[in-house]
Image (cartoon, rainbow, N blue to C red):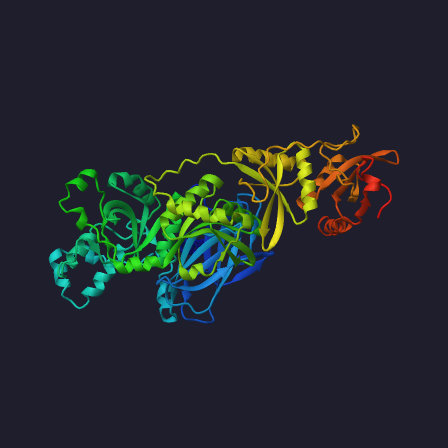
Amino acid sequence: MMHSKRLHKRLMWIFTCMMLVWPITVQTKENGQPAFITNAYFADKLEVEDQLVKPGKLVNVLPARNPSMVGYFVMDALLARTGEHVFEIEIVDGKRKKVAEMSFDPVESQDREHVYTVVGSVAGAFPPGWLYFKVYDRHENGPRIHISTFSIMAQEQSAAGSQRAKATQPATPPSLPKAPEKKLTEPASKLAELAKTASFKEKAEQLQADLLATPSQSIDPLGGYVKADNPPPVIGKREVLDTLTTSKPAQSKATDKRAGFKLHIGEPKARAAQLEPLRKEVAGLGLPVTIGVVRQNGTPSMMVISGPYKRKAAAQFAQRFIEQQLNTQSAIIDSGESITRAVTQRVSKKQFERSSQPLSERAEPISAAKMAAGANHLYVVALGSFGNPENAQRLSQGLATEGVSILKQVVRSKGRRYTRVFAGPFQSKLKAKLVSRQILASHELSGSIRRWSRSQLAKVQKFTAAADTANTVQQGLARQAAQPAPQAVTLPKVSPRPHAVQIVSYLDLGSANLMERRLVQMGLPAFQSPALTNGRRLIRVMVGPYPSKLKAQEAARYVHGKIGMQGAVVLYKTPAAVEKVAAPVIPAPALPATSESLEGEPRFFNNSGRQDFTVYAGFFSSEDNAKRLVRRMGRLELNGFYRQVEVRGRSMNSVCAGPFPSMDAAQRAVELLRSQLDIARPIIRDATFSGRQGMGCGPGRSR
């Protein structure tokens, strides 16, 4: 009997401790969260039993200000996405100040129901009060996502005894400081007397801080939004605050002097009813949202406003959250300046029309100091961060040919190097929006508009496009400046523009001629276009032009399937040094019509009779293996081909690279095949053996 009672008490102890650290779930979309925490607890030590790590005694109170304190935080994570997960934990105190952080080694998930136990050591002197453990997951080196929050109380040793006596009673950690409940129930006459006391100012500020929080949600220590276990009552708070402030001088009805930050979301509208769908979407995210009156270009209008937020970091978090969930842009406004008072209740059309207050008195004009501060800022369009610098270079080059100015920035994160690409800078947000829509229509790439200071702009590098596109860049910027402001938030209709496929770039004119000839033999309209990159003159071999981007993409896929080279689809413009050509037709070389010859093979002698060279790579009995090696050569910008030859009575597939105009060019190809494709003995052969008889490359004497 005694044994069963002890067991029952121990089970109740474990249940109570687990309830104290039960996670506060974040509102997310279905299947949008990469991981979930199914269980978490704190232990004083870890024990090894039967080769398994088990927690020792569970604790719900940590000793405060004790440098020798050591404990463990254990949680079970359900990985809902395949790939690499990196867990990070930030520990903050009740004042939302970060006191420590924890990071863990990456874990690889092979399925969507992978369970992983995370164990972290908690040591050091913590401040007294509630400690919040913010758990983040970084999936596949992407942005870190807040997945859960846990809390535990840290107490001084003198108060630990009283806390242990109450260990079996469940405790609920506060998410935000609350005003005493008695303030909300006292009559107005008693509250008026309270305003005369010395502590009135402090109490009013406390209620004001409560109003800055979301009524139905509570802000966690790092700015994310979580459900509160016991949300503070909200009925009557605004009436109580109005009663408390009746003894103060009345402020202007047009402005709100409360310190904080607000978000102006979306575009302004003439009527509040037009903004009601957007307001409901923002409210569905758990954010504080209202509809307010603003003034733009001297005209008053209505706008969706979120906030206010006490810290700018929280406003920035909400801004990113809205952009990710609703794909809607917003601007951060400092409420400390004179701005429009937000409408606190739902405004209908009749209420707006029947208002006796003129619209000109509802909004405060933008101050001269604020306009001067805005002149020191510019706008850019963030297009993406690339781990492969070639992809960033390709995007920058393609946009530069369209006349868009490009900025690049190289950053390091988690030991890796990334290249960020921006369009801009622009003097106004309107110009940035126009360019962003142009990029979305032509490249199907959605950019994010950001406001930069002059100091931020000095840290990035301006992209220098090819010399033949310099004039086009200036013309494109002039066109952007001359474009009128759009009347509606609809994407402009873009007429089809010609596109071309950039296959490869060469330093050597002979190599460019060979590739162009090979593409023409395949029936493609090939041409050459010179370019200047980093002071080096390149010859780009291109295919086109085509009337639409879709046709150019089909041609790029055809080239990739034939010769294994991945081309880049770009907007076509007539090259500065080459006339526009229309599907040139050059007769193919006279080769014997045998089953061994392949369509589109390059000639080994040019028209002047000069002898070229080839590089023999090896034999394959399987034709698929030969084709695979040819494709790998194409990725190295080598012209690979293969022929069927007979070796000792057997049909084999001989793979070669070339032809090359000189012995030095062939030698460079040999070094490339050895270092990149691990080919042990590539052999240079001349055309006296492999070219004149149409035999391709094969066994024979070597050079």
Which residue: 66% across, 34% down?
A: 520
Place of residue 394 in the rendered image (x, y in percent of width and height, measured from the top left): 55, 47
Report the side of 79 relative to 652 (left or right): left
**Image position, residue 300 (x, y; %):** 23, 46
In the image, what residue occupies the spot 39% across and 38% down? 491
Q: Quadrant of residue 260?
A: bottom left
Residue 145 placement, left or right of 373? right
Res 324 seen here? no
- 67 lies above or below 370: below
Q: Closest to the observer: 349 or 468?
A: 468
User: Would you say 635 lies left or right of 694 here?
Assistant: left
Q: Residue furthest right?
A: 648
Between 432 and 206, the residue placed more toward the observer is 432
How many numbered marks, from 0 up? 0
Q: List x then y, in percent, for residue 572.
A: 53, 39
Q: Quadrant of the N terminus?
A: bottom left
Residue located 54% across and 48% down the image: 468
